[in-house]
Amino acid sequence: MCGIFGITTNQNKPVGKIALEAIKRLEYRGYDSCGIVTQYESQLLVKKDAGKIEEINQRIKLDDFPNGSRLALAHTRWATHGPPTKINSHPHLDCDDKIAVIHNGILENFIELKEEMLSKGHVFKSETDTEIIPHLIEENLKKNVDLKDAVVNAVKKCKGAYGLAICHADYPDTIIAVRRESPLIVGIEEGKTTYCASDIPAFLPYTRNCYILEDDEIAILKAGTVEFYDVYNSNFPKKKDLHHVEWSMDAAEKGGYEHFMLKEIYEEPDALRRTLKVTNDSLKDFAKSLLSAENIYITAAGTSFYAALAGKFIITKFLGKYIQAIECSEFKTELINSLEKDSVIIAISQSGETIDLIEAIRWAKDYQASVKILSITNIVGSSITRHSDKILITQAGPEIGVAATKTFVTQVLIQSLVALEIAKLRKIESQNEIQKYYDALHSIPEVIERFLTKSVDLIKYIVRNLEKNLNFFFLARGISIATAKEGGLKLKEVACRFIEGYSAAHAKHGPISLVREGYPIIFIAPPDETYERLVGNLMEFKSRGGKIISLVVEDDKKIGDLSDITIRIPQPGDKYHSLFSPITFVPALQLLAYYAALEHNLDPDKPLNLAKTVTVH
Ligand code: G6P
């Protein structure tokens, strides 16, 4: 969940400044403390502290290092072991201040290793698991091995997850990067500068050429060169493919918007347009695997799980088979006695790194080797792709805001495209009918564009109106329960309000007792097969004094007329568009959460205690 960055160069570059800018671009991975180390005249110079990067920088000028420095490591932390304090922030050093380590992940056996090192006389300063690494390396270097082997032998003793970048005061241009289960990418400007980072945006202003480190690979970075080895076969270098990243720098920067979250909501139409171009062959491949499956599961975490709930609904409509949705953290517990060998699992993750999801699919494969994993992710080369039989990549582009926005809509869209491939293969609908669903999908970017152009003031007005109420809820039926849950999650994440998305029918069994005169309830009401029943639910709340806010399509009459405030999504009220309503309705709720965060003076890009990529259980 932390962000790590390293640079080694033979150019006259301000490495401290570059490192600082890089961790600012990684701040969505964690932002409770940070630090930078540079190597200069056989010494390590460290600056670190607790707080947000910009605050710390104002206090201690994080990037102010001597000019001749050619190497730096930088870290932005999401605390796991030890509270966010200066002492616990990274980098961590050995006893002689010669070795510096930054780490993303969790070392499970650090207590045993720490006891071993303490018994050998090492002195620890922090409460972190990370600090064990520089001491293990220091200990290994006493045995006259070189730095690479000292690192290899150190990580071989560690259990758990790590993306590590390491430097040594006596190795002026060397960074060692090694990973297991935590992402690490190496970027390169041939012959000049080499970078490592937990995410591509960190070095995107300088290079688009990169290598993706796999589990148990180690990279030796020098200025403008890199060599790769396997941790468990570290005598001979190995070849790796160079990737060229298509993402533009614009996409990874705020570009005039106040926050990434807002910018990324406004990028949804283009993200959807790109995703609409995903090739038919890969969609058809996915569709065929689902058609031949006996048992199908869909699993994910957070926003991706709500995208899965929407997607399962859309796919099931054309597939004619039940798909069971299970949160990835519960996957093994739920299926340990029943996962059949001919099962297919759809796994969804924007980052492709969520540890609970990786663990769920790895367990499934170990338990039944013939199980097939179909994954949907936004990140080429991410961990999930290594455990998958088939992969679909959403084309959302880099998403920096901690709260997922454009990845949600593209995840639902790509599942919708799979659903239509299934419809074609099964020939259960006429060509003409299927085309109408495609037309609806292709009109979505414009629908969202029109909504974003004309409805912002209304959303701000609703936020001010809701402000007085400490709680309210979203109610819906059918596929819109996924929309309601995602709306509730967004408000929890960025506006720190425990707002729930709930089944409108089920709300009679509890939540209705909260309703008093003027109590707000937001009804999500596309004109689908649940609409008439939802009108009935709405009346139950209205007759108890509830203040009804509704989210409906443009030409809606009934629910719109019954509501105190109506948000209208400019889309046709037919069944073709309604099936995909989570894609067009959720942006309204994202915007609501965004402005609610501002109303509460909260930074929507850096919600308290959250991180974008969750690599701990
Ligand atoms: C974190 C993020 C959420 C995200 C969830 C799942 O909680 O803050 O925005 O939905 O992880 O992440 P994934 O990368 O697997 O989609």
Image: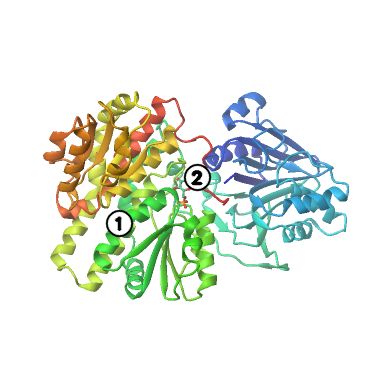
* Residue beneath disc 1: 276
The answer to whether the beta carbon of the residue marked 2 is less than 8 Å from any atom of ligand 1 is: yes
Question: Which mark's residue is nearer the viewer, 1 or 2?
Answer: 2
Residue 566: percent from the left, percent from the top?
A: 20, 34
Residue 243: percent from the left, percent from the top?
A: 52, 59
Residue 298: percent from the left, percent from the top?
A: 39, 61
Residue 566, visible in the rendered structure: no
Residue at horizontal 70%, vertical 64%? 231
Q: Amino acid at mark 2?
A: Lys
Q: How is the image coloured?
A: rainbow
Residue 258, visible in the rendered structure: yes
Residue at horizontal 52%, vertical 56%? 356
The disc at residue 515 is: none
* Residue beneath disc 2: 612
Q: Secondary structure at mark 1?
A: loop
Q: Amino acid at mark 1?
A: Leu
Other-residue count near label 2 (Cα within 10 Å), few / some / many at <14 / 14–19 / ≥20: many
Residue 480: percent from the left, percent from the top?
A: 27, 48
